[in-house]
Amino acid sequence: MNARGDLFRIAFLIGLLALTCAEAAAAGRTWTTLENCTLISNRSNDGDSFHVRVKRREYIFRLYFVDAPETDASVPARVEEQAKYFGITQAQALQVGEAAKRFTNEKLAQPFTVQTRMEDALGRSSRPRFYALVQIGTADLGEQLVENGLARVHGTSAPRAAASGGSEEWNKLERLQAEAKRERIGGWGVSVNRTTVRSEKEGGKPYDEFGAFFHKAQSLAPPEKSQSVSRERPAKGAPGPVKFDVNTASLQDLQTIPGLGPILTERIVAARPFPTADALRKVKGIGDATYGKIRPWFK
């Protein structure tokens, strides 16, 4: 009995020592500033996590402080949690995630700066991922996502490289989130079709769509989807000039198709990939009548 107790105490002390060492290592990390970074197009990129090239090296960074909704239903529990936070359906949460991804793609279309302590952000890739702060000019990407209702204040925080601490930044983000919620934009306004309405905060200008403050020379579609997905809203009742790819069309695209509501679009996304669009017949809730109505909209 004493031997077993001694073993327990030894195991406890070893665990405590390991935890103390890990905390000390985290506290002792120094900040590294990486300038002239460029975004690498990758299917796994989303609003708060993305592949970055700095000179000839590639990194994966995950934003401190914020959490943008998922863009697919591969982790159902996480999508459910995010939807509950915003008070929306899971299909709507995925729609906000797509909007956040578009937002980040557009913002990072120009060179940007990364500040990181190379703190492990886990992730599902075999390549390591690190927490970071990202700046475009003088603007902070995490703050912009929260300000426009495209991310929640959530996750891991860290003291900034500057004098202000992590708690100060957290408080600022909570104020921005409260304002976005009041304005009913992004995830807070998806139920009233205000997913891509920006914050009123830029010089007191009136609300407008993303296209008004993104550079208009480029498509709003992520690079890997731009060749197959039309961003113009098709007229009701007839396919648009470019038909959708059943495996890459966003929730926002799918919901423009007559006959597809939030439940069916969520089921389509969850059932991907399809060998061809003909396999939509196998999705629960898509009968002959619905299939006949939606099939012409796909390649």
Image (tube, rainbow, N blue to C red):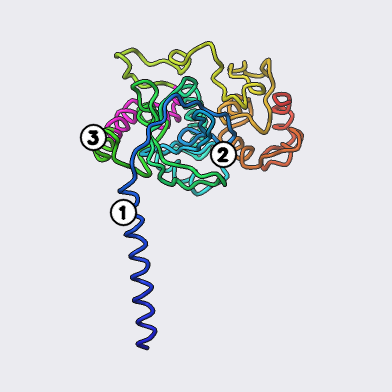
Number of numbered discs: 3
In front here: 285 or 299?
Answer: 299
Which residue is at the far bottom? 1
Residue at x-position 59% and y-position 24%: 223
Residue at x-position 37% and y-position 66%: 15
Q: Quadrant of the C terminus?
A: top right
Disc marking residue 35? none
Q: How many residues crowd around disc 1 within 10 Å: few (fewer than 14), some, or many (20 or more)?
A: few
Q: Given the image, on which type of amino acid does mark 2 rest? A: Asp
Q: According to the image, label 2 marks what residue?
A: 72
**Helix, strand or loop for disc 2:** loop
Instruction: Locate residue 246 relative to residue 129 in the image: left or right.
Output: right
Disc marking residue 164? 3
Q: Quadrant of the N terminus?
A: bottom left
**Looking at the image, do the residues carrying marks 3 and 2 touch, with CB atoms under 8 Å apart?**
no
Kindly report the distance in space between the C-alpha atoms of the residues bearing marks 2 and 1.
36 Å
Q: Earlier in the sequence, mark 3 or mark 2?
A: 2
Q: Quadrant of residue 83?
A: top left
Q: Earlier in the sequence, mark 3 or mark 1?
A: 1
Q: According to the image, label 1 marks what residue?
A: 24
In the image, which residues are magenta?
Answer: 173-196
Tell me the mark number nearer the camera, choosing from 3 and 2.
3
**Helix, strand or loop for disc 1:** helix
When the figure is inspected, residue 17 is found, relative to residue 86, above or below; the finding is below
Which residue is at the far front? 56
Instruction: Locate residue 53 relative to residue 291 in the image: left or right.
Output: left
**Looking at the image, do the residues carrying marks 2 and 1 touch, with CB atoms under 8 Å apart?**
no
In front here: 132 or 230?
Answer: 132
